[in-house]
Image: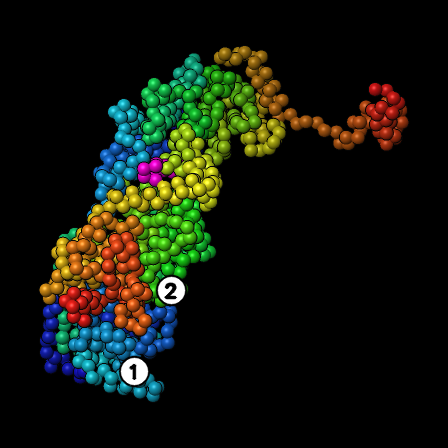
Amino acid sequence: MQSDERVDAALSALRPRIAAFRLAVSGAMERAKNTLASESGPDQARVALGDFAARLIDPDRFAMISSRFGPLDSVSLAIVERAVKALEALLRAGDEDFIVDVRAGTSAAAAIRARMTALGPAFAAATIVDLVRRRTYDPAQHGLPLEAHPFQKWTVAERRLAPPLVIRLDGRDLDAFELAPLIDGWVRLVLLVAEPCTVAPLARLVSPGVFVAQTGDMKVLERVTDFDGPAVIAVMSGSEARFIHDPRAGSAMWQRIEVTHMPAAQPRKSLGARSAWQQRDDLSHLKALIQQPVLAANPAEVLVAAGSSGSYDPAERLTAWLLDQSTTDGSP
Amino acid sequence: MTAVAAPASPELRIAPTVLNRAEHTIEIVSDAGEGAQKCGQIFGAVSAKMGNGVWTVEIIPAEIQPPPRTAEGASGNRVRFGTGPVTNGGDETNLVIAFNEQVLLGRHRLGALASDAIVLLENSWATSSNPDIRSAWDKTLAELSTTSYRIIEVPMEQQCLTIDENPRKGKNMFALGLLAYIYDRSLERIDEQIAYAFRKKSEEVYNRNVALMRLGVEWAAANLDFRIEVPTHPPTEALVVMNGNEALGMGALASGMELCAMYPITPATSVSHYLAEVFSKFGGILHQAEDEIAAVGVAIGASYSGKVAFTITSGPGFALKTEFIGLAVITETPLVIIDVQRGGPSTGLPTKVEQSDLLAALFAEPGDAPRVVIAPATIEECFHVVVTARQIAETFRTVVIILSDANLSTGVQPFPRPQLKKEWLAPELDLAPVKQGQRPYEWDARTGTSPRSIPGQPGGMFTVTGLSHDEGSKVAYGAGVHQRATTMRSRKLAVLQQTLLRPAINGDQDGDLLVVGWGSTKGAIEEAVERARAEGIRASSVHLTFLSPLQPGLKEIFSRFRKVMTVEINYSDQPGDPFITEENRRRGQLAMLLRAQTLCDVDCWTRVPGEPLRPGFIHQAIRDAALTLTGARP
């Protein structure tokens, strides 16, 4: 496993996203508590109206007006109280809740999913509270679990608030295809990879909207602080390929991807579930991604080369080619 | 008139006579810019902190820089302080410190001084090299010689020049020292208050002011043959001392306001001065717009987008905001507007108190634009009113106008330190998806209220419009739609009125005369009623806080008294004046409102003197009104 310094550095870089998640949790808890408090009716109205209103306004009558809805039923009250407890538990969570240790030989994606499922009740609780506040909560229809709420059920908005995770794993267990379904919203996965590892395990995740990096430099993590999209970064220490795919860097793939190191030798042995051929194909894929399109210096030459005239004069050859393409001879 | 002789030598000096008084009223008056107001403010604050009840009134010329040494240009501060609570500026001044004889003359001619007032008068003018000044001095003292004032000449300038070479600077701190000696104020507390007053200046400035103040103490100890004891009762609970505008600003913070959009206008501006220092520390935004119209527009926009916003202004600014207030009403955008009233119309009396914006606050709008109008009566209420106003504005999606005035805005009064509550703050924005099918104006047919959608709330998007619209905010000119929408907006006020409590009656529950007031006149009215009751007049008073909607039960309360009379600081025609008849008489603004709403024959006694109503004048008006009940002519 990696040293704690790398974990600390990763957590430090992810701190804004952790704070955003915690803010969402505390906001949901505030709403939940307000919902419970507003059930106290006149007492709540008396306090909220302030001292000035004490001899001027009847809090009982004001509470009847200010509450748009009737009182909560016992089922709704109970679920909000449970939501408060779930949210309080999440707020008490320390940094360790954002660190995932993948047991060697097991699925990294499964471990990540499990942690997301454990943190997901924050979103479930917030949703439930909002439904209750609007008096639209139906236990049968909205039976969101407050103990576990898997990533696949998170909404678009919730995925943008996804808790960032630092994952310590063995390189053999890194499978990009397994991770792909988790890449969405503002997901941040920082993989602290222990050797040995395949040469380009994340090359298959490169796509136009995803920040992907294989790096040995922790500073790369700072680049995703304000990136508007998902990011997966593998921090490695071996001779694997080093690259950064930053969707903000350009419109074409070759503009967005920056390769700083390409392994000299082709993989010849299988590693974990990846055969040597698969590893070589990962590498070929990465090389193909950085390939710039070849453009002729003079587009006319390309056209001339396609012409049938035997003239050496480029103008004549171009004219001949154009005539050749036309239908002036009556042919269809 | 008595002038003090040259000071006795220390060995011949006898102990000063100590006069015991339950309360005293002092004035410090000068030309504008000589710091008399600061002297009074510091003295008032120190007295309050030592345990006196205090009410201060600023004496402000209508011009920013009137000509010096004129009777009309007096600038300064009146401080009424006593052993018990003090609720108003009182009647006459017992002790005056005047920086020149002309400002003293101005106060004398206004009848501001008690007949036995003690006057400490700067005497450098008597020996001025300018013969006109010497002549004016002689004439003034000749005029004052017919009074019973005890005038003590004080060589303020001569003394101050020993510390500060600028004769226009330092007299105020010297005067503060005189007062500190006369009333035995704590010098340590004065030092602290000077430090606070000059907190943005250098230490050298602080040291010079403290030295001038102590020079005044020493001079008084060496030359005055009297002291005045107004016993203090050190407070048993934590108090705060502030003026009404600071209280409004703090109330805005306590109520969770997030944005104040304003344009500078006297006498409201100092609220924004206070907020400029502290608002951002609490996440608030103070926005000085390019004009009054833009200011209210910004506040409405911020509120529409989910922020808790307010705007602050005074009469002329309020007039400019009229159209946008209508927009807030028709779009049902919660909005709190603070109007610190001053004398009008037009630019009128920028620095002087008046209660002339009531009808404008209630009705100044084309079309039907119901809004809530509340008037705090004390400086403490200036703090707490903002909390209530915000709650009402948001609960009813309506405009709430707070009517303060120049008397409250500059007056200083101690009051119990507010115990802030989390519930006063605005709750977190509810951005949960809007209930399916819910429209932006889903009026409850019974109450007229409707849930509010915030931009960004899923399902809550709608086109906001100032045009007549239906529940879906769709422009609709149909007669039925406009009638329904207008009814719903009006219904909210009726519903709010149903939550209000009947006003409390000060005094007996029935009797001959009921005095009705609103706003800052409460203390003076209640004091006047107490005096009248002590004379056997069966008078009581009611002070109205809600002007729109009016508190319930007024008609029934009025029926228990033989005569009902409002007391207001706005204009009314005087019965008996040329051409004035019962039919054409224009009455005080509250009187007009009460007559319309209760169909009771409500009379009024109003004045627009540009200063707070004195309890003595109100007392006389009560006597006169009581006389009319006996059939006698006052």
Q: CA distance from mark 1 to mark 2?
A: 38 Å
Disc 1 target residue: B125
Residue B76: x percent and y percent?
29, 70
Q: Residue visible at 33% across and 84% down?
A: B133
Question: Quadrant location of residue B379?
Answer: bottom left
* Viewer-side residue, A46 vs A4: A46
Residue A180: x percent and y percent?
50, 20
Up the image or down, B461 lies above or below B139; here it is: above
**Image mark for residue B346:** none
Question: Quadrant location of residue B382?
Answer: bottom left
Q: Is residue B166 left or right of residue A170?
A: left
Q: Residue visible at 28% across and 53% down?
A: B597
Q: Crowding near pointer 1: few (<14 within 10 Å), some, many (20+)? A: many
Residue B149: x percent and y percent?
19, 79
Image quarter in which the C terminus of chain B is found = bottom left
Q: Is residue A141 magenta?
A: no
**What are the residue bounds of the magenta stretch?**
B444-453
Chain at tag 2: B
Residue A268: x percent and y percent?
57, 13
Q: Are both tags, 1 and 2, on one chain?
A: yes
Disc 2 target residue: B345
Element type at marker 2? Answer: loop
